[in-house]
Image: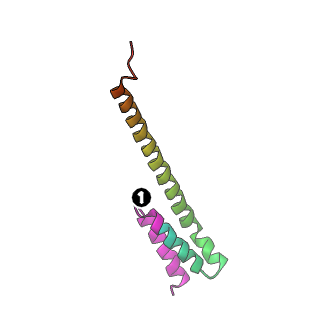
């Protein structure tokens, strides 16, 4: 069992080392660590890192969705061009 300082240090480490590819696993691990903290005061110290991880997950998910929508738009326009639907006379 980690001390509260060690637990906070691990959550902080996760915050600074997380990537788009690891955000879900890192956030899950950070939540488990947060739940293991004994007091509300200890959990409050981790709040900034937990909120930061949640914000990163939201930002990266939004960017990924936007990227997917853009690719779909490009595919649709490409299909329309091939089908001759987008001719301008």
Helix, strand or loop at mark 1: loop
The residue at 45%/69% (across/down) is 14
Q: Magenta segment range?
A: 1-25
Name the image quarter holding the C terminus. top left
Q: Position of residue 79 (x, y in %)?
A: 37, 32
Q: Within 10 Å of the Cα at label 1, are there few (<14), some (14-19), or many (20+) other Cα atoms? A: few
The residue at 53%/66% (across/down) is 49
Q: Position of residue 87 (x, y in %)?
A: 38, 19
The residue at 61%/74% (across/down) is 43
Q: Position of residue 20 (x, y in %)?
A: 42, 58
Q: Residue lying farthest top?
A: 89
28 or 82: which is nearer to us? 82
Q: Which residue is mark 1?
A: 20
Main secondary structure type of the part rendered in magenta: helix
Residue 12 located within the stretch drawn in magenta: yes
Residue 31 located within the stretch drawn in magenta: no
Number of numbered discs: 1
Q: Residue lying farthest right?
A: 40
68 or 28: which is nearer to us? 68
Quadrant for residue 17, please give it.
bottom left
What coloring was used for the rendering? rainbow
Q: Residue lying farthest bottom?
A: 1
Q: Residue lying farthest left?
A: 82
Q: Is 1 left or right of 86, judged from the image as shown?
A: right
The residue at 55%/81% (across/down) is 4
55 or 77: which is nearer to us? 77
9 or 80: which is nearer to us? 80
């Amino acid at each position: 069992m980690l001390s509260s300082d060690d637990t906070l240090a691990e959550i902080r480490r996760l915050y600074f080392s997380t990537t788009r590819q690891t955000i879900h696993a890192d956030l899950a691990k950070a939540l488990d660590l947060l739940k293991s903290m004994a007091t509300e005061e200890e959990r409050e110290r981790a709040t900034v890192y937990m909120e930061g991880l949640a914000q990163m997950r939201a930002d990266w998910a939004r960017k990924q969705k936007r990227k997917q929508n853009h690719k779909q738009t490009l595919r649709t326009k490409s299909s329309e061009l091939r089908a001759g639907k987008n001719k301008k006379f």
